[in-house]
Image (cartoon, rainbow, N blue to C red):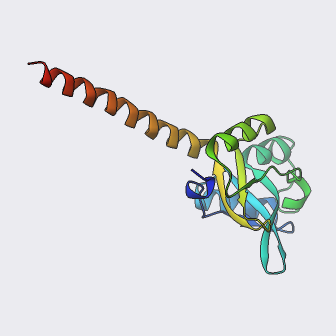
Amino acid sequence: MPISEICNREVVIVQRHNTILEAAQLMRQHHVGDVVVVEERGGVRVPVGIVTDRDLVVEIMAPAIDQTVITVGDIMVTELATVKENAGLSETIEYMRAKGVRRVPVVDRGGGLVGILTLDDLLELLAEELLALAKLVRHEQKKETMSRR
């Protein structure tokens, strides 16, 4: 299954010049733990960084920096790990593990932002798959019991 089928296509985005306060307000408004920083390149939104709720706490709140003057570009993670939309599930999980990231923007062939995939998304998907397998086992056990009466 390609990642494009399971990624969240409603990505909260900002630009480098947005303040940290604006980013935090967007995270709260949309109930997300990150914003993806994008640049417009030829009419395409290309992800260039990411800021997480943890970044806000560690980089801004803990040292008590003024959130109205610091921009997203000042603290964003620039070594952005992204995954192509046609990547497989196992491949993406391994990539996220190797990079040590909980979130990856999903991009098309041209590098344009398609969506985002988070660890939470993966856990939910895998839990649903495990539940389906458990139901299969239960169904087979009932079927066998009924056939042997």
Q: Quadrant of residue 144?
A: top left
Q: Is residue 146 left or right of residue 32?
A: left
Viewport quadrant of the C terminus = top left
Q: Foreground residue, 68 or 112? A: 112
Residue 41 position in % (x across, y down): 85, 76
Q: Residue at x 79, y 65 (%)?
A: 111
Q: Residue furthest front?
A: 147
Q: Is residue 145 left or right of residue 61?
A: left
Q: Residue furthest left?
A: 149
Q: Is residue 2 left or right of residue 76?
A: left
Q: Is residue 37 left or right of residue 119?
A: right
Residue 85 position in % (x across, y down): 68, 58
Count of all numbered marks drawn on residues in the image: 0
Q: Is residue 129 above or below residue 111?
A: above
Residue 137 position in % (x across, y down): 33, 27
Q: Quadrant of residue 58?
A: top right
Q: Residue at x 62, y 44 (%)?
A: 89
Q: Quadrant of residue 123?
A: top right
Q: Residue at x 44, y 40 (%)?
A: 128
Residue 98 position in % (x across, y down): 79, 35
Q: Residue at x 83, y 62 (%)?
A: 68
Q: Is residue 138 above or below residue 28?
A: above
Q: Residue furthest right?
A: 74
Q: Foreground residue, 10 or 88? A: 88
